[in-house]
Amino acid sequence: MTASGCSSSSPRPAGQRRSSTAPPASGAVLVAYFSRAGENYHYGGRTHLQVGNTERLAQMISRYIDCDVHRILPADPYPDDYDQTVQRNVREQDTDARPAIAGPLPNVDHYDTVLLGSPIWNVRAPMIMTTFTERLDLRGKTVVPFTTQVMSGLGTTARDYAASCPGAGIAEGLAVRGEEVDDAGAEIRAWFQRLRLRM
C-alpha cells in the first residue's frame, strides 16, 4: 500500500491552503480517507489491488484542490482476502463496533471543510469511519462524503455522518464505482463545481 501524494497528517504551510467552498464553509480543506488494497471485487470477479480504489480516488481529488491528506489506518489491518474482509465487516456492523485506529488523529481545528472517503461495504462506510468521526469535533465544519462502491452509491454515509458529526453540515457527496475510479476526473471536477470548491 502506498501513501498519498499529498502530506499525511502534517499540514501544508498556511499560505498554500487557498481552497474554498460556498458558505457556510470556506478556507482550509482536509481529505481524510480509509482504503483497503488486496483482493477486491471487480466486475463480478476478483482482482488484486496494490493500491485500494478509495486511495486512488483520494489521490485524484488531492491533485485537483489545495488540501491536506490524512490516511485512516486500522490498528488491526483488514485481511488481504476479500471474503474474510466481508465476514469481518459484517461482524463489526452487527455489533456496532468501533475498530481502533493506528496512529494519531489529525488536528482539525483550522479546517473548514473535511472530505471523508471510504469504500461502501454492505451499504455503509466501514465502521472505522465512525471511530474516526466520533473522535473529532467537527462542529461548524462542512463534511463531504466520497465513496467507492459497486452498487450502493453513497450508502448511508450522509445519515451516519450527520449522527456522528453533530453540528457539522453534510454536503453533497460523490460515489464512484470502484472499477471506474481512474476515469472519474470529469465527474470529480463537476462535483467540485457543484460544491463551489475552488480547483
Image (tube, helix red, strand yellow):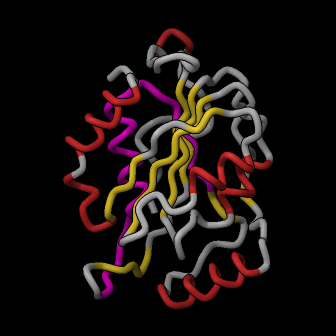
- Examine the structure image and report whether residue 70 is included in the region drawn in magenta: yes
Q: Nearer the viewer, residue 198 or 154?
A: 154
Q: Residue at x 38, y 45 (%)?
A: 59
Q: Residue at x 31, y 81 (%)?
A: 47
* Residue 119 pos. (x, y %): 48, 63
Q: Is residue 177 left or right of residue 73?
A: left
> Does residue 56 appear in the picture of this structure?
yes
Q: Is residue 91 above or below residue 97?
A: below
* Residue 62 pos. (x, y %): 39, 36
Q: Is residue 53 left or right of residue 30?
A: left
- Examine the structure image and report whether residue 47 is included in the region drawn in magenta: yes
Q: Residue at x 57, y 50 (%)?
A: 158
Q: Residue 51: which quarter of the image?
A: bottom left
Q: Residue 75: which quarter of the image?
A: bottom right
Q: Which residues are magenta?
A: 45-72
* Residue 166 pos. (x, y %): 76, 39
Q: Is residue 89 above or below residue 25?
A: below
